[in-house]
């Protein structure tokens, strides 16, 4: 799904219908209302983090932050099912590994698939993935079984000439820390927004053998 913030168009990444929170890339704008392509308001920015350098190169050891949490407006219909019919789920320990088959679902490019290329400090690059402007924020996932996919990361942009994404495990840790700092009382019965619950028993996928 395409989302618009100001003059920026991005892709809505993972959506959790229970908590009514969604993810996209932090460089998509970061403040104010979020609308669809028709200009209909669908929510507000809950929190964001963005430290992408302007004009500078990103090295493998650099800690990169580029995510945004969206709180959806009441009445907005939500689904965690991707346009290709895959049910997208998440697990905190779902980390990328070199060679792991992954796909990107972008609102401009549609689904493009390849594999994880290199793992860096909370982010990773990919091979054979064709992300374009407008695909930022789209989910990067691996198919675990027919009809199901596991969230691995959120697409950011091209770093060093290669398509790159923040890993979901890094985003989850940063968001939890940021939300606790901003809204100490958040939680059941306290009137504060919650992040999606993280399954504790889910296992990270392993790359398919050749």
Image (cartoon, grey):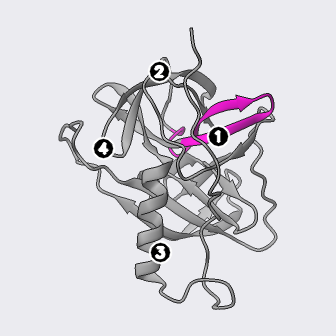
Q: Earlier in the sequence, mark 2 or mark 3?
A: 2
Q: According to the image, label 3 marks what residue? A: 179
Magenta-highlighted stretch: main secondary structure?
strand
Q: Earlier in the sequence, mark 2 or mark 1?
A: 2
- Is 58 on the left-hand or right-hand side of 147? left
Residue at 40 percent of width and 80 percent of height? 181
Would residue 196 be counted in the magenta stretch? no
Q: 152 or 5: nearer the eye? A: 152
How many badges with numbers are in the image?
4
Q: Earlier in the sequence, mark 4 or mark 2?
A: 2
Q: According to the image, label 1 marks what residue? A: 150
Residue at 22 percent of width and 47 percent of height? 54
Give residue 21's quadrant in the image: bottom right
Q: According to the image, label 4 marks what residue? A: 121
Q: Are marks 3 and 1 in contact (CB under 8 Å)?
A: no
- Segment tinted magenta in the rendering: 134-152
Residue 133: tell me if it is visible. Answer: yes
Q: Position of residue 196 (x, y in %)?
A: 64, 64
Q: Position of residue 169 (x, y in %)?
A: 47, 51
Q: Earlier in the sequence, mark 3 or mark 4?
A: 4
Q: Are marks 3 and 4 in contact (CB under 8 Å)?
A: no
Mark 4 and mark 2: Cα distance apart in space: 17 Å
SS under mark 3: helix
Q: According to the image, label 2 marks what residue? A: 99
- Is 149 on the left-hand or right-hand side of 140? right
């Amino acid at each position: 799904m395409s989302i618009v913030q100001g003059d920026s168009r991005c892709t809505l990444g993972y959506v959790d219908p229970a908590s009514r929170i969604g993810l996209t890339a932090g460089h998509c704008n970061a403040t104010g209302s979020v609308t669809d392509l028709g200009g209909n308001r669908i929510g507000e920015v809950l929190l964001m983090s963005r430290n992408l350098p302007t004009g500078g190169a990103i090295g493998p050891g650099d800690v990169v932050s580029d995510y945004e949490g969206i709180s959806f407006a009441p009445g907005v219909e939500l689904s965690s099912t991707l346009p290709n019919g895959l049910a997208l789920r998440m697990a905190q320990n779902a980390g990328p590994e070199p060679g792991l088959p992954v796909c990107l679902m972008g609102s401009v490019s549609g689904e493009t698939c390849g594999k994880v290329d290199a793992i860096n400090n909370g982010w990773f690059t990919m091979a054979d993935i064709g992300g374009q402007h407008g695909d930022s924020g789209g989910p990067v996932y691996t198919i675990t079984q027919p009809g199901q996919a596991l969230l691995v990361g959120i697409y950011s942009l091209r770093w060093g000439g290669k398509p790159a994404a923040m890993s979901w495990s890094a985003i989850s840790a940063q968001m939890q820390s940021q939300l606790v700092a901003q809204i100490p009382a958040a939680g059941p019965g306290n009137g504060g927004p919650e992040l999606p619950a993280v399954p504790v028993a889910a296992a990270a996928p392993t790359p398919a053998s050749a």
